[in-house]
Image: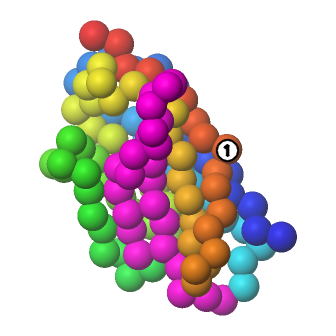
């Protein structure tokens, strides 16, 4: 059974940094990638970043140059390094792990940025 567990959220002041982790277990070999989302209450879940198993990443314009996705394939863990955070980065962050075409959600982790 595939499990996706996120960690690393918390409270930080504007201009600070956080690193989110997304650890996956129970996966057999497959072509895989991760997508990071964030969601503010009452709004849709938006894509923040994607990263393939080869380490190729993409970013939403709102975080480009500040956030960096990386991964440890051996540990089946993806990371989202968040630097120079802003108050409007406040949201619940989710990762979704894809094994082939099947996606698995993490439970979400809250990030709160104070000004």
Return the residue nearer the eye: 88 or 16.
88
Quadrant containing the C terminus in the rendered view? top left
Please say whether residue 74 is visible from this viewpoint.
Answer: no
Q: Residue at 61% x, 47% y: name it.
A: 6
Q: Nearer the viewer, residue 51 or 40?
A: 40
Tell me what residue is drawn at x 40 percent, y 36 percent: 18
Residue 65, percent from left and from top = 16, 48
Q: Which residue is mark 1?
A: 107
Q: Which residues are magenta?
A: 29-52
Left/right placement of residue 81 relative to residue 112 reads: left
Q: Give the quarter of the image for residue 108.
A: top right
For residue 102, what is the image quadrant?
bottom right
Residue 76 position in % (x across, y down): 59, 70
Whether residue 80 is situated above or below residue 62 in the rendered picture: below
* Residue 88 x/y as whole percent: 30, 24
Taking the magenta stretch, the answer to whether it contains residue 78 is no
């Amino acid at each position: 059974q595939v499990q996706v567990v996120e960690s690393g959220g918390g409270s930080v002041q504007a201009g600070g940094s956080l690193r989110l982790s997304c650890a996956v277990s129970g996966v057999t070999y497959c072509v895989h990638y991760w997508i990071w989302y964030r969601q503010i209450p009452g709004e849709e879940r938006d894509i923040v970043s994607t990263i393939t198993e080869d380490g190729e990443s993409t970013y939403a314009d709102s975080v480009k140059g500040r956030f960096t996705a990386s991964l440890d394939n051996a540990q089946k863990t993806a990371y989202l390094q968040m630097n120079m955070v802003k108050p409007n980065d406040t949201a619940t962050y989710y990762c979704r792990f894809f094994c082939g075409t099947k996606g698995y959600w993490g439970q979400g982790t809250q990030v709160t940025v104070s000004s």
